[in-house]
Amino acid sequence: MAFLNLIRYKNLILILLTQVLIHFGFLKALGLPVALSSFDFGILALASLCIAAAGYIINDINDVQSDQINKPLQTYLPEPFSEKQAFNYYLLFNILGVGLGFFLSYKTGLGNFTSLFVLISALLYIYSSFLKGIILVGNLVVSLVVASSIFIVLVFDVTPILNQFQEQLVTPLAVLRDYTIFAFMLNFLRELVKDIEDANGDYAAGIQTLPIVLGLERTAKLSAYLGVLYIFSILGYIYVYLQTNVWTSIYLVAAVVVPLVFFCMKARYAEKQKHYAFLSKLLKLIMLFGMLSLGVLTLTLKY
């Protein structure tokens, strides 16, 4: 169980669910053409999971000092894993993930896209080793990497056949592009909250994050205002693109907008560690509900 926690298996399940939902629960469920066979999609998903697992491990290695302060009961380095063992796991997952990415790229005739896997892996390493300590830059980078779990499915599943099936795929591609943007936005908000939650350990480790510079309560209030901006963005999106799709609109309001309103209310007055931990978990739940809305959209379009 310690090993599964080291690679953040719950987050990996969320990544897998997202990619499966896009390929099987949206594109194939609507009878749309896809470039990847089920076997090739499995390779893509496994490559994504391996690179993500490697990213979580290297982040733990570089966060030993701060994690011992922020979450002493949830650390896995140096016990039960030594840093050397963890780094070996990091190398194993990284090599496996990038290797599978190379294999898939050349198997599908998309050799130019091999650099994507290297880029994502490199960004995760640079983030945990250096960028994390640069105010907001680290938050932006890790949010881009999270959103790439959607983007990379588009690259391999849709773009190779877009010219051939442009009329059928242009709208689904736009929908998935919008989901990628919203995933980036919500994860950026969660990264701000996580920085507040981890401020004590980051300060001890000499990491400069926005809560350390601006203050915990001010950053929490800023996250609340950002949440309000997101609420209006989602409501605007529903009004422009989904007003004729009643069930999807109702779901998004109930499962995403209302929890975001609750988040903003709580964040506005958050001042204790347990408040910030709750807000972080709430945002993770909102991200899950938001991704599941793609399944609701599929059902409404199909039936």
Image (cartoon, rainbow, N blue to C red):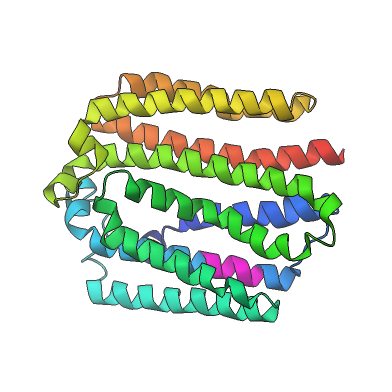
Residue 212 image point, x, y percent: 19, 38
Q: Magenta: predominant secondary structure element?
A: helix
137 relative to 155, above or below: above
Relative horizontal placement of residue 141, taking residue 184 as reference (left or right): left
Residue 111 lies, in percent from the top left, at: 62, 78
Residue 152 located left or right of residue 194: right
In the rendered view, tell whether residue 83 sits above or below residue 200.
below
Q: Nearer the viewer, residue 207 or 253?
A: 207
- Image point (25%, 38%), residue name: 210
Residue 246 drawn above or below residue 122: above
Residue with the most extreme front position: 163
Can residue 275 be seen here? The reply is yes
Q: Along the horizontal axis of the image, is 209 left or right of 260?
A: left
* Residue 43 falls inside the magenta stretch: yes
Q: Quadrant of the C terminus?
A: top right
Q: Nearer the viewer, residue 77 or 99?
A: 99
Locate residue 127: give its quadrant: bottom left
Q: Is residue 10 visible?
A: no
Where is the N terminus found, in terms of image quarters? bottom left
Q: Which residues are magenta?
A: 42-48
Residue 87 at x, y percent in the picture: 30, 74
Q: Position of residue 133 (x, y in %)?
A: 24, 51
Q: Residue at x 35, y 24 (%)?
A: 267
Magenta-span inclusion, residue 273: no
Q: Residue at x 50, y 44 (%)?
A: 184
- What residue is shown at x 16% (from left), y 56% (from top)? 65
Q: Give the mark count.
A: 0
